[in-house]
Amino acid sequence: MSGGSVTLTPVARGAHYGWVIVFCALLALLVSNGMTISGLTVFDNALLSEFHWSRGAFKLGGTITFVLAGLLGPLAGGIADKSGVRPLMTLGAVMLSAGLYQYSRVTSLADVYLAHVLFGVALACVGLVINVLLVSRWFTTRRGTAIGLALVGTSLGGSVFPSLNTALMRSMPWREVFQQIAFIPLVIIPIVWLFVRDWPSDKGLQPYGGAAQATMDPSTLPGMEYGAALRTVNFWALAVAATATFYAILAMTAHLFLHLTTGLGFPPATAAAAVSTLFLLGLAGKFIFGAAADFMNRKVVFIGNLSVMLVGTIFLLMDSTATLWPAVVLTGLGWGGLYTMLQLLVVESFGIRAAGRILGTITVMDAIGGGLGVVLTGVLYDRTGSYRVAFGVISVLVFLALLAATLVKPSATPERA
């Protein structure tokens, strides 16, 4: 897009094209997160039974995905800042499809790790950072609602794919299931090229609720420079909160199915339903708290999300069938809202001038945390024979995230327009 003059057309907000962008981001996150995080866990018992790997070694694959996605996040964000998101999202969809097909051919841990390398590239290109950045460009008011709606896709994916994959495994071998679902990510590609536009000015429009941005020249965009952002308390408080909570939620989602089936004795269908419920509650939390952040004090909402999540992890630590559903409900609701608030607070604190690089840098840190959560929880299980110690670590980290949240100073008040 050039820096020349563009005729910009304000439209009725209810019909603004930004909501089409939100839907595209929701769909991309539904597929990318749903198929690489929760959707994979229902295959765990089949793979571990066939190959007899330790849980720590097997779950190292998830760590590879999240760490690689995090390390590539700043690069992907920088490319999106300068060159647009459509080529990145296309590459991500192809890599995700390739990773799923690779899983159908595994005979060793090295094969598993290769699949997770492909997943890491996919998440960097078509995952959280790129989609939050895209939606943020299209909204100045109602940004919390817009980001919350887009992030609903991660929860929808988390609720859809465990049940879908479990159902498919009843009728065909697990390798064939992977071959069938490998086609699903390719659906993203035509949608991206038909409907996604990087900037409102690409459609001759203004952002929802704000002045138009007619150029991609970073010097003309509102917000902080990257270096200045890294010197703020807000950046490090948000980064610590993100790192600790990503450890917690990814550790929980990666091991919940195994814990319910081998630890508490639930049948696979019930365990898959619990994983799906966790993500469905996350869906509700993302939308409800995202919308609330447009009208309420964002720091209060942020601390509230963490408090709810902390109580949920304490119920999980009790390791009882009686506390399972309260743990799932509260952790899902708290995490859902928190997921939205982290992205919103980053954009609101630092603007969109260097949003891709800032979000990408925080993603490096939270991906490392999330990756460690996946593998260390498996290692702790292997050494202790239960998840009690591992779930205790989760609760402690959520408490530390709550302390970090008290240091955040939102730089923008909610806009009611």
Image (cartoon, grey):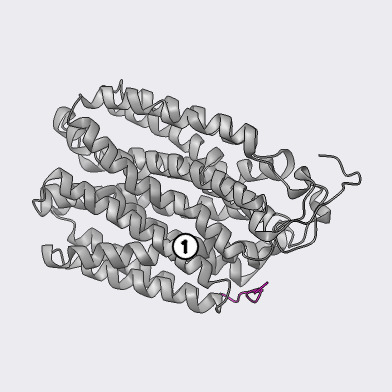
The residue shown at (27%, 36%) is 165
Q: Which x, y percent locates residue 18?
A: 65, 52
- Which residue was labeled with disc 1? 287
Q: Is residue 416 magenta?
A: yes
Near-viewer residue (341 or 214): 214
The quadrant of the rendering that contains the N terminus is top right
Above or below 34: residue 250: below
The residue shown at (20%, 63%) is 325
Q: Is residue 155 magenta?
A: no
Near-viewer residue (362 or 261): 261
Q: Secondary structure at mark 1?
A: helix
Near-viewer residue (13 or 212): 13
Left or right? Give the position of 267 relative to 83.
left
Report the span colored magenta: 406-417
Q: Main secondary structure of the magenta part?
A: loop
Q: Which x, y percent locates residue 134?
A: 63, 48
Q: Would you say residue 379 is visible in this rendering?
A: no
